[in-house]
Amino acid sequence: MSRSDRIVESVAGPMESVMIRPPGFRGAAFGEAAAGDLRVDEAGRRRAADELGVSPEWAFATQVHGTTVIRATTPGLLGEADAIFTTRQALPIAIATADCVPIILEGTGFTAVIHAGWRGASAGVVERTISELRSGGLNVSRAAIGPSIGPCCYEVGDEVAERFPDFSRRTTWGTTSVDIAGSIEESLGSVPVWRSARCTFTDTELHSYRKSRTKLRQVTVAWLPAL
Ligand SMILES: [Zn+2]
């Protein structure tokens, strides 16, 4: 089933923003390069937090391209994981990417962020997160997929392509690629999905590890607003 009719890009409002806000979400923002690497750029994080109306004290994880899901109850670095969720109001949770796919899940009483590259996606990090949430009585109502490297540019070898048989594509220069974000959207089943159409590799306002071997990342943040 095609969901291309749902693909819309947020546009900058009257106040120029350095965060991409998926419409219809309670507490969700995807960073651009100009926002700063909000894991380590504290001034940038304070600026973003002010703009978003949240605390500058965010919960992060050490990302390892795995499927571990961690529950955040405090800010700070929580340990090794590629998915974080929280049921605590006003506690921002964040992950960092620069080609991998950033995902935000929202539902009643919780929010979650996921970092998924080809390793995490093929290992089922999104499905694992949804099932851990569900086992805690938390059901996903909507999902947002931020900018990642697109099938236009994500050249891969056969060992990666064969893990995504339904999402094998061609780069604009004619080599084998895969649509990781597309595979993630499919794994979300009937959950409504907002998806960015931007490609980190070609978009000059986004970090891409493939493009420049940068250590910098754009940061995705989600939060449950305080009542
Ligand atoms: Zn591209």
Image: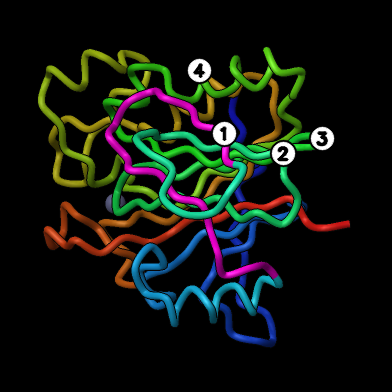
Dot 1: element: strand
Dot 3: element: loop
Question: What residue does disc 1 label?
Answer: 71
Amino acid at circle 2: Thr
Classify 17 as above or below 100: below
Dot 4: element: helix
Disc on the earlier residue, 2 or 1: 1
Measured Cα–Cα span from mark 3 to mark 1: 16 Å
The tag on residue 128 is 4
Q: Residue at x 69, y 87 (%)?
A: 14
Q: Are marks 3 and 4 in contact (CB under 8 Å)?
A: no
Amino acid at circle 1: Arg
Amino acid at circle 4: Arg
Q: Nearer the viewer, residue 77 or 185?
A: 77
Which stretch is magenta?
A: 54-72
Q: What sort of colour scheme is used for the picture?
A: rainbow
The tag on residue 20 is none
